[in-house]
Image (cartoon, rainbow, N blue to C red):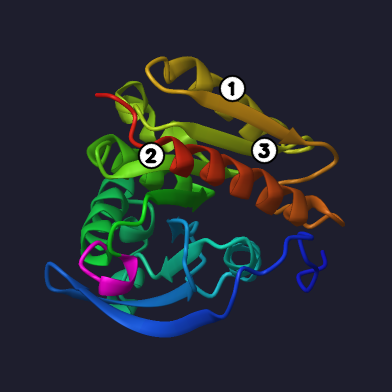
Amino acid sequence: MNLSGSSGRIQQGPVSRSPHPIEVQGAKLQGDLSAPAQSRGLVIFAHGSGSSRLSPRNQFVARQMNNAGLATLLFDLLTPQEETDRANVFDIGLLGRRLVEVTRWAKTLPELDGLPTGYFGASTGAAAALIAAAEMEQEVRATVSRGGRPDLARERLPEVLVPTLLIVGGHDAVVLELNREAQDSMTRSDVSLEIVPGATHLFEEPGALEKVAELAIAWFNRHFNQGPAPS
């Protein structure tokens, strides 16, 4: 996997990158905000289990989004102390609530004022993103899942109204079937399933992650430009 490549998009201007401590309901989380000049929207990332805001794959996708004029926020869903309890790592309800709280925090930042917002979730983080999207339908315009586990949010899927893109590797057979089932359950939203041919779960194959970034950027641009969906 080449993590130094480009999606072929021209950077829209200088990118401001800054670490941000995020305090939500007694938890102090670490986040990294990257905001190009004149950002067209904000994408908040939710990483998978065993990962963090430093995930090289998510960071690569975030850089491509920055180059395309989108601001990104990568943050740790749990504190170091919380991570020691494996039950927290797979507590999708907790992670979804944490994502909602961080979204509300981000809305208070002057540099993000008025920007349309979306979620990019990977693996188990995609389930947290879908739960948060169900809660934040008025504030969130679009969601993208990379190799996601939407089945972990199965009970909430019918409540998701936010346009959702499910990206799965063509050789990730089990996860592909889980995403097809999720698509069938999400009858109230605009849901699209994109299969990256030849890719496995981590999208390590040449060009696979670049394709993920390309699909995600196009999805966010489309729905950020459309305005909020009606309730």
Which of 73/129 is in front? 73
- Looking at the rendered structure, the secondary structure element under dot 2 is helix
- Give the image quarter of residue 141: top left
- Residue found at x 42% / y 84%: 18
| Magenta segment | 107-112
Amino acid on which the number 3 mark rests in the picture = Val
Amino acid on which the number 2 mark rests in the picture = Leu
Q: Is residue 24 magenta?
A: no
- Residue found at x 62% / y 35%: 175
Amino acid on which the number 1 mark rests in the picture = Arg
Estimate how packed mark 2 is, as few (under 14), some (14 to 19) or many (20 or more) residues with alpha carbons within 10 Å: many
Estimate how packed mark 1 is, as few (under 14), some (14 to 19) or many (20 or more) residues with alpha carbons within 10 Å: some
Q: Quadrant of the N terminus?
A: bottom right
Residue at the disc numbered 3? 168
Q: Quadrant of the C terminus?
A: top left
Say whether residue 73 is left or right of residue 132.
right
